[in-house]
Amino acid sequence: MVFQTIHSLTRQEASATQLAAVLGWPDFRTVISRVVGLGKRIRSRYSLPAMKRTDGTNTYWVFFFTGSYMGSQFMYRLRPELAAALAECGLLDKDKLRALPTTAAYLFAWNPDKWNWKDLLDDIGQVQTSGKVTVRWSCTSHRRVKPGDRVFMVRLGSEPRGIMASGRVASEPFAAPHWNGEDRQIWKVLLNLDVLLNPASEPILTLEHLGGGNLDGQVWTPMSSGVQIHPDAVGELEAEWFRFLTEQEGQSKPFAEEADWTQSFAEGASKQVIQTRYERNPYAREQCLAHHGYACKVCTFDFEQQYGSLGHGFIHVHHLTPVSMAKSPHRIDPKKDLMPVCPNCHAMLHRQNPPLTIAELKQLIKEA
């Protein structure tokens, strides 16, 4: 992955710190340990002589890279013969590399038979009005989880059982009192949920739909909360979750006793949340950018060309047609309904309601 990532960068060079940022790894030490570990295995396997630094200590990165200092940072460059080998093996597809998830994903569990989520309706309301809600949840993977990691929440216990929420980890793990009132501490994290469904009144992605392909290898009814989802299953889960959300949008109806609660939200705010959900959904973003690329469709600005590896993969995704303008419920097509734009152009598109079109903003830039 390190070799492929360096080759995918515009300048085909990066420091260990920059590589860690692109890959979503904790820090530069993770990159160095992977490179050193592989170098040691290759040297042992093929009985290669040790490569020495000027101080006499062994070095292993030279098996794979050339490089030089740029200021205080050492910039790695892939050796041409290694790049040629990767190309021969078909491992240098730049679009596929960009689409790979850079953060881990974790499965958090809620069992209403064991714990009453008293604030569930209020939390759903918070998502409807502001786009997210922050909740505190127990986490068994406290040694690995970090802010920014992807989150899915599964409802267990009595039916319906399945995925009911998604979002991101919002804090480092911390010790807090046990949720059941026991006199002991457990590890918890804060979660920012941007999708939160009510299993009592609307469909959720049931366990029956979490099968096939790599999804079969994941346990969807964990004994504890905050377990890591197998990396091979994350992409398929994102795709299935996106498909489910787009097909269900606008079709579910609230229970009668919830009617006043539902109607209390401003329709525009609710639909803006829906629209933002699609723009930020990892699967939708991946599909959009794999098709359209990473340059702004308004001004053509490309962050990686301007900033090097620091700007790798950075771009906003814009929803072309506001949800409020849709004449009927429809499935979102990331390739047709979403478009990459830089933050400046994105802000200008939304300076009026309904938003400007890409063509209109291009014309305004031309006239200016």
Image: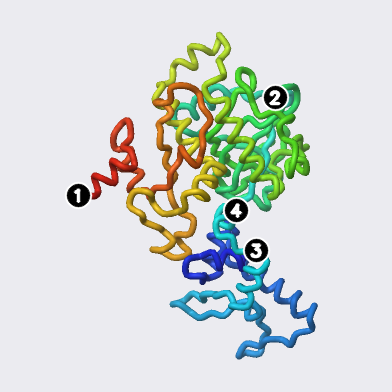
Expressed as whole percent of the image width and height from the top left, the position of residue 37 reads: 71, 71
Give the SS element for disc 1: loop
Label 1 with label 3: CB-CB less than 8 Å: no
Question: Please, what secondary structure does the residue beneath circle 4 have?
Answer: loop
> Residue 112, labelled with which disc?
2
Return the residue found at the far left: 368
Q: Quadrant of residue 205?
A: top right
As drawn, which residue projects farthest toward the top? 256
Q: Secondary structure at mark 3?
A: loop
Residue 73: assigned label: none
Instruction: Please report contact status of discs 3 and 4: CB closer than 8 Å, yes or no.
Output: no
Along the line of sight, the residue nearer the viewer: 187 or 57: 57
> For the point 57% across and 52% down, which residue is it?
99
Mark 3, residue position = 90
Q: Earlier in the sequence, mark 1 or mark 2?
A: 2
Q: Which mark is residue 100?
A: 4
Measure the C-alpha gap from mark 2 to mark 4.
Answer: 34 Å
First along the sequence among labels 3 and 2? 3
Q: Position of residue 359 (x, y in %)?
A: 31, 42
Q: Amino acid at mark 2?
A: Pro
Q: Position of residue 184 (x, y in %)?
A: 72, 39
Q: Is residue 302 shown left or right of residue 165?
A: left
- Specify few, some or many for label 2: CA neighbours under 10 Å numbering under 14, 14-19, or 20 or more: few
| Separation of residues labelled 3 and 4 (CA atoms) | 16 Å
Give neighbour class at mark 3: few <14, some 14-19, many 20+ (Cα, 10 Å).
few
**What residue is shown at x 60% (from left), y 53% (from top)?**
100
Which circle's residue, 2 or 4, is located before the other in the chain?
4
Give me the disc on residue 368: 1
- State how far apart marks 4 and 1 are (Cα): 39 Å
Q: Quadrant of the N terminus?
A: bottom right
**Vertical comparison of 31 with 284: above or below:** below
